[in-house]
Amino acid sequence: MQTALKLNTTVLEGHRIEITDPELPEGVEVEVVVTLPSVLAQEGTTQRFATLATRWYQETAALSSVSQIAMHPAYQEIIGMGDIAVPLILLELQQKPGHWFWALRAITGADPIVPAERGKLRAMTDTWLQWGKERGNLS
């Protein structure tokens, strides 16, 4: 039988977390789940996205096949981040157009691109940015 016990603590010097509780018998195995404040979680997500995006850009720069570009492991990992990646992708698109459309469709299930825009990077970028603004994913 498992019992849940909520304890609050502070991260100590050296990024250590120390938990002491008189109710915990010495030597017992416990599972510790750490919940980060949302600001820290967002910073971690932003850094992870930036690292993956940089790797993706570097390793796909010489590729011309959109399919190969989209199947790159870093790109797939960004897709795996889910909804939290959408505003980050849109910000990236806002700064420089790129092949983020596959990821946006995979994560959101949306496809706001009309047939006349297909293959036109600037038009597709503008459409996705407008889509993001309308849904509050982009200021």
Image: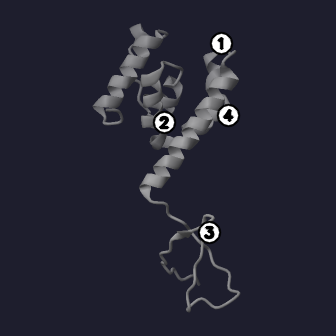
Residue at image mark 2:
107
Q: Nearer the viewer, mark 2 or mark 4?
A: 4
Residue at image mark 3:
16
Camera sees residue 41:
yes
In front: 111, or 27?
Answer: 27
Quadrant (top left/top right/bottom left/bottom right) for the N terminus? bottom right
Nearer-N-terminus badge (3/2): 3
Q: Count residues near mark 3 (Cα–Cα under 10 Å), then give few for <14, some for 14-19, many for 20+.
A: few
Question: Spatial distance from mark 1 to mark 3, Cα to Cα?
Answer: 46 Å
Q: Secondary structure at mark 4?
A: helix
| Image position, residue 102 (x, y; %) | 52, 25
Q: Nearer the viewer, mark 1 or mark 3?
A: 3
In front: 116, or 41?
Answer: 41
User: Pointer 2 and pointer 4: residues touching (CB < 8 Å)?
Assistant: no
Residue at image mark 1:
64
Q: Secondary structure at mark 2?
A: helix
Q: What's the image's color scheme? A: one colour
Residue at image mark 4:
73
